[in-house]
Image (tube, grey):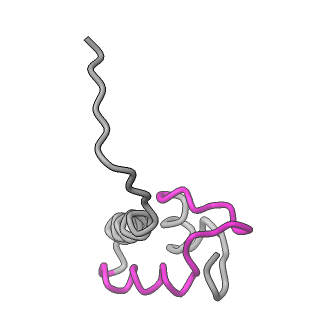
Amino acid sequence: MPTGATTYDLTTDIGKVRLRIADTNIDDAVFADEELQALLTASGDDIHLAAAAALRAEAASLQNHAIRTGTYEEDLK
């Protein structure tokens, strides 16, 4: 859970980004409002670019938590 305020208001750009990245459960939010605002600012206030940046950041975060168990192969023929 992020530190800082988390809001979900579809009349704001932050709320619109949250909708696009499915980060709508404020009790279990992935991003704080200030993180989304930083992505909006870096994206020239384009909500679609900010949403894409947020999803890339979340994917990178999840990659750091991946568990590698070795090589897996299965022939389904």
Nearer to me, 64 or 18? 64
43 with respect to 23 (left or right): left
Nearer to me, 71 or 54? 71
48 with respect to 13 (left or right): left
Q: Main secondary structure of the magenta part?
A: helix
Q: Which residues are magenta?
A: 20-44
Residue 41 screen position, x and y as percent: 37, 86
Residue ID at (25%, 11%): 77
Residue 56 seen by the camera: yes
Magenta region includes residue 6: no
Query: Quadrant where the N terminus lies?
Result: bottom right
Residue 50 screen position, x and y as percent: 37, 72
Looking at this rendering, what residue extends furthest in the front direction?
A: 70
Residue 33 screen position, x and y as percent: 57, 81
Please say if 13 is above or below 24. Answer: below
Nearer to me, 44 or 32? 32
Residue 47 seen by the camera: no
Please say if 32 is above or below 69. Answer: below
Residue ID at (34%, 70%): 53
Residue 71 screen position, x and y as percent: 29, 44
Residue ID at (47%, 57%): 20
Quadrant of the rendered image containing residue 58: bottom left
Count of labels in the image: 0
Please say if 41 is above or below 20. Answer: below
21 with respect to 11 (left or right): left
Magenta region includes residue 41: yes
Please say if 55 is above or below 44. Answer: above
